[in-house]
Amino acid sequence: MAMITRLKVNEEYADIELGDLGYLYIVWDFVLKYYNGGSTKKLDAFSGSCSVKGRKQNGFDRVVNLTERMTGYYWPYKPEVTFSVPVGTSNIVPVPHLIDDRKAKKREEKAAQSFIDKIGRKIGLLDKTTQGKNRRHTRWKCSAPVLPGAERKRPDLIIVEDYHIRWPGREALAYGEKYDDNLKRLVEMKYGPDRFNNDQKEAYIKIATVKRFSLLDIYQDDDEGNTEGVYEFSPEFVPAFGFKKEDLLPKIRLEPWVAAPEGRPINILSEKLIDRKSMETAYHAETAAQILQNSPWLEGFGKFESTENGIRWVGDDGKIVEYSNQELQQAVDYLEEYEDIPRDYLPYIQEADVVMSTDNALMVAVNFVKENKEEIVTFIILSVATIALAYFASAALAGSIMFVLRLAVFAPALGASADLWAADERFEQRSNCYAYKYLVNKPKGSTYEPNEYKITHYVPWHACEKNADTSHLKGWEEKVREFDARHSNLPNE
C-alpha cells in the first residue's frame, strides 16, 4: 500500500499560507518517496559538523536549491540560510550571511548578467544587479559570524515576501546598507526522530519574530481515506525542478544509491580503481560515463606532476591529462565564487558523490573536514555544452574542476605551488602517501624484505598517517622512488 505524505502546522506557532504549503508538500512528497534508506555516515552526521542533517532533510535542501540556481536565486523558498544571531537579550536584528561582495562583482556581474537579464524579463525584476546590496545568501554553512559575539544558526527554510529581492532577512542595517524587511516566514521542519529544542526556538524567534515563526511536522501513513495534511501545488509552477512550465530542464534523475533502501555512493575521488561495471552499481550508466569521461584516474593508476606552465596527470598507460595554471585558477575561482567553497578548504575534501544527474549535468556532493568541522556542499557540473545556466559549472570547466578536486586530495603541495590554495607543511609529507600490500604471510611484527611487499597506489594526503610506520619494510625509500618513476614520464634516478 502506498504511503501518503502529510504536513501538519503546529498551531502553537504561526500558520503557513496554503500556496506555500502546496510547494512544501510537493517537494517533501518527492523526497520521502525517492530519497530512501537510513542515515549515511558521510552525508548525514559528524561531530562538530556544520552540516548535520538526515538524508531526507538533505534531499529537501538539494531539490529546492536546484530551483534557486535555475532562477538566479530569485526564488521565494530559501533553504539552509545561515544567520548571525546575537546571544542573550540583545535587540540587534539577526543578519543573514551573504556572499562576499568581491566575488559577486567578479563573476556574477560579468558572466551571469545575460542570464539574470533573461530571468528578469520573465519575472519583472526592477533591480537586475547581483552585487552590492542585491547579493545572494551564501551556501557555505560554516561561514564566520558577521555580527560581533553572535552565534551561527541555520533554519530549515526561509520564505521571503518578495522573491524579486534576494535579501532573506528582516529590516536591518548590515554590510553598509539599509535593507527592508523581506522575511515572510521562517519554517522549522521536523521529520522522523528530529526534535525541536528550546535553543532552536529562541534563536529562530529572534530571526523571524514570534508572529513569523512556523513549525511544520512531516510524516507519512497509509490511511487513503484521510485527506488531512495533503495539499495542492499551484499549477503555474513546476514542482521543485523548474521556474515555469516552459522553462523545464531535462528530467532530473536521482542516482540509484540515493533511492535504494540502504544505498551507498561510490566516492568519485577514491584512491582505488573503479571500472565502469562497479560504477554502475551506484550510478546510472549515463552518469558513470560522464564521471569516467573526466576521471581517467579511476580506471588506471598515475601521478600528478608540475609542468612549465601548469600541472598534469600521467597514467601508467601513457594517458596524459594536463591543464595550465590559468585553467586551474579558473576552476578554483568558480568553486569559490559560485559554490562558496573557500579555496583553502579544497585540500580537506574527504569524499565526493554524485546525487542527481541529467543527460548533460551532474550534481556532486562534496564532503570536507577541516579542524574537526565538517561541511557538505553540492554543486552542478555540465558535461556537455547544451545548457547555459549561470549557476551551473560550464562544460568547459567540467574537466578542470574534476582535475582540481583530485589534485587537492592527492597532490595538494603542487596546487599550493601554483597558488591554488594556501600551503601546509603536511602537504610535503609524500613518503608515507602510498598504500602497500604484503606478498607473503608472516607473524605480526615481522620485518619484510623488498621482494615480500608491494606498493600498490597513492593515497590521499590526509590518509598518510594510517601507514606512517614503514620501519618494518626494508628498502622502502627505494621502492617509493621506483614506484614514482613507473608512474611518471621522468627517468628513474
Image (cartoon, rainbow, N blue to C red):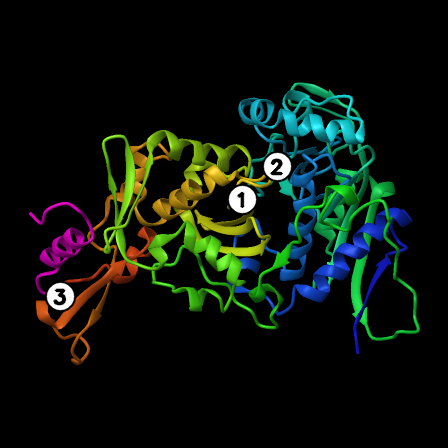
Nearer to me, 31 or 291 = 291
- Looking at the image, which is closer to me, 239 or 147? 239
- Residue at 46% across / 38% down in the picture? 397
The image shows residue 112 at horizontal and vertical percentages of 60, 28
Residue 375: give x, y in percent of width and height. Answer: 52, 48
Q: Residue 221 carries which label?
A: none
Q: Which mark is residue 382?
A: 1
Q: Do the residues labelled 2 and 1 touch (CB within 8 Å)?
A: yes
Task: Pinpoint residue 401: horizontal percent, then vertical percent.
Answer: 44, 42
Residue type of the residue flagged with mark 2: Leu
Circle nearer the N terminus (2, 3): 2
Q: Distance between the residues labelled 1 and 3?
A: 45 Å
Task: Determine the image quadrant of residue 45.
Answer: bottom right
Label 1 neighbour load within 10 Å: few <14, some 14-19, many 20+: many
Residue 14 visible, this angle: no
Nearest the camera: 387 or 242? 387
In the image, what residue occupies the spot 73% across and 60% down? 30
Q: Is mark 3 on a helix, strand or loop?
A: loop
Marks 2 and 3 sit apart, C-alpha to C-alpha, by 53 Å
- Residue where numbered disc 2 is placed: 389
**Stretch of the chain drawn in magenta:** 474-493
Q: Mark 3 points at which residue?
A: 473
Is 105 within the magenta?
Answer: no
Q: Given the current orientation, which residue lies at the most extreme left position?
A: 493
Q: Quadrant of residue 468?
A: bottom left
Residue 441: percent from left, percent from top: 18, 80
Instruction: Give the CA distance from mark 2 to mark 1.
Output: 9 Å
